[in-house]
Image (cartoon, helix red, strand yellow):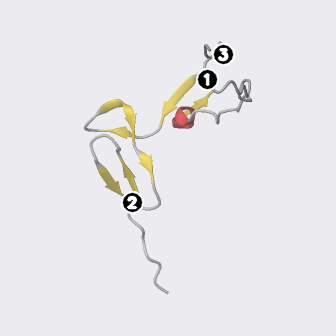
Amino acid sequence: MAAPKGGSAGGDKKGKKPHKNKPTSKKYKHYTVSGNTIKKTKTCPRCGPGTFLAQHKDRLACGKCKYTEFTIKQKVIG
């Protein structure tokens, strides 16, 4: 007896999986448009343009070469 056509040997067909919408790519958040000009956010000085720095709570970091810039918090005395 031959296996049924279409893939599985058991013969239990489940059909196509339902389509799931994927979230929009995050690459567009690195650019801002004002008028006819486009501005990029901070890029890595070691890796060059095209590699953006991730914005964390207290630092900017490059995921490729591990370059890090810490942001300075000023304490308010009073």
Q: CA distance from mark 2 to mark 3?
A: 64 Å
First in sequence, mark 2 or 1: give its number.
Answer: 1
Where is mark 2, residue-wise? 71
- Where residue 4 is drawn, which disc sits there? 3
Q: CA distance from mark 3 to mark 1?
A: 8 Å
Above-or-below relation of 74 to 18 = below
- Which residue bears the numbered disc 1? 8
**Residue 35, percent from left and from top:** 63, 25
Quarter of the picture holding the N terminus: top right
Apparent side of residue 23 relative to residue 50 in the rendered image (left or right) = right
Residue type of the residue flagged with mark 2: Thr
Report whether 39 appears left or right of 52: right
Picture residue at 30% right of the left edge, 31% below the top: 48
The amino acid type, in three-letter code, at marker 1 is: Ser
* Vertical relation: 10 (above or below) 2: below
Q: Position of residue 42 (x, y in %)?
A: 41, 40
Mark 3 crowd level (few <14, some 14–19, many ≥20, 10 Å Cα): few
Q: Position of residue 61 (x, y in %)?
A: 36, 49
Nearest to N terminus: mark 2 or mark 3: 3
For numbered disc 2, what is the local secondary structure? loop
